[in-house]
Amino acid sequence: MNPLTRKLRNNYWHLLCHRQEIRDSGDFIRFDWLGEEVVVFNDNGSVIAFNNLCPHRGARIFLKDFGNQPFLCAYHGWSYKNGQLCVPKSQFSSTTDFSSVTLNLLEIDWCGDFLFASISPKFSLAAQLGEVTPLVEAISHSIFDRYDFNRYSYDCNFVIAVENALEPLHVPFVHSSSLGLLKLEHDTDIFSGVNSTCYFSIGDTRTIKHLLGLKKYFSTDFQYEGYMSIYLFPFTMLSSTFGYSYSLQNFFPTNDENNTNFTSRLLTSKLSKLSDRNIIEPLFHSTSKINRQVFDEDHLICKRVSLASWSVERPPFVTRFEERIVHFRKICKSELIVDD
């Protein structure tokens, strides 16, 4: 395992899901990172994140990407409920001591309604998020439901995928028939510790008029009337157009340096009236379709980029649209020179 990648996975907090995605008992979401799996599970109202292996013989508990089912090992019937691991005692001697048998739990914390998890965080979630905390929290309170779930492998290293997501320079060339139709105009980059946020105005007047006309249908705690992209170091992006929905993207590394576990979800914002859902449905459908197209286009271009071209050093030629990449590499470089 690459030392830098291992440190980034183990020592940082990672945004895994929104509370609405695991609102019912038995709800779960599964993720793959560095050859291991982590599952977020609603245990009768109590949320846990754990290594997806039964402590008995290592069988995987959850196989699907997400869903709702009891925590039950299909191999030998071990289960977990109400914070307790339930072992079929009849399978063992009456003197067997189970006091040390537990799930391999991750640490979890919340920022508003967003759940973060970490294996061994080197600082608190609040310290990692820093000044971006109020923004992330406000967004979390504006979300009502998950509309789309999209997952597949990117044929590139996660650093290539992340850097592609960090810069808008490629948009007119790679996304000419999707994101490029918004005619985004770069406004400003804001850096908050290891994180960064980029704000864009929408240059297409027809799109602006349409989006403004939809505002009456939504009731949100936060709205940016443009395009916004938040990077939560090291593996997560949160982006939105006009705050009507949010795309939550994870670029989790794998043991194969030329592969990334990509997951995106479209999280819809709260409506003023639930009865307006049918009116807004075409917007959510269109947004999910365009998002999938954008990510497919990103994947295709990232496949062209050789990992041999990447380093923690500042790129030799940097435009004003690539300062977030410079910032990303600077943080990665600092991680390499700091001892565990």
Image (spheres, grey):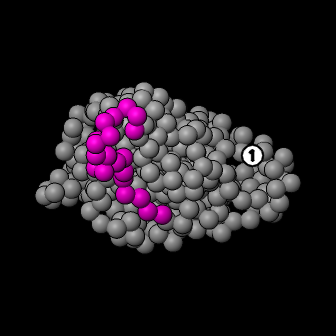
Q: Position of residue 302 (x, y in %)?
A: 40, 33
Residue shown at 24% from the left, 50% from the top: 7
| Element under disc 1 | helix
Where does the image place residue 104, in percent across and percent down from the top left? 34, 47
User: For this rendering, which residue is in front, 244 or 213?
Assistant: 244
Residue 290 lies in what quarter of the image? Answer: top right
Q: Residue at x 28, y 33 (%)?
A: 255
Quadrant for residue 130, please give it.
bottom left
Task: Give the residue number, with chain letter if any, for mark 1.
Answer: 283
Q: Is residue 103 magenta?
A: yes
Q: Bounds of the magenta span?
A: 89-110
Residue at the image point whose x is 77% and y is 53% from the top: 210
- Horizontally, residue 234 falls left or right of residue 148, namely left
Q: Is residue 294 above or below residue 23?
A: above
What's the residue type where badge 1 is placed? Leu
Quarter holding the N terminus? top left
Q: Is residue 2 left or right of residue 149?
A: left
Residue 64 in view in this figure: yes
* 229 w.r.t. 296: above or below: below
Please name the residue shown 47% across and 69% down the image: 133
Would you place residue 55 above or below residue 155 in this image? Answer: below
Residue 174 shows up from this direction: no
> Of 2 and 198, which appears nearest the observer?
2
In the shown orientation, is residue 267 left or right of residue 196? right
Q: How many marks?
A: 1
Residue 156 placement (x, y as % from top left): 35, 32
Q: Position of residue 80 (x, y in %)?
A: 47, 45
User: Would residue 287 appear left or right of 56 to someone viewing this image?
Assistant: right
**Could you classify mark 1 by the number of other residues whose Cα lies within 10 Å: few (under 14), some (14-19), or many (20 or more)?**
some
Magenta-drawn stretch, dominant element (helix, strand or loop): loop
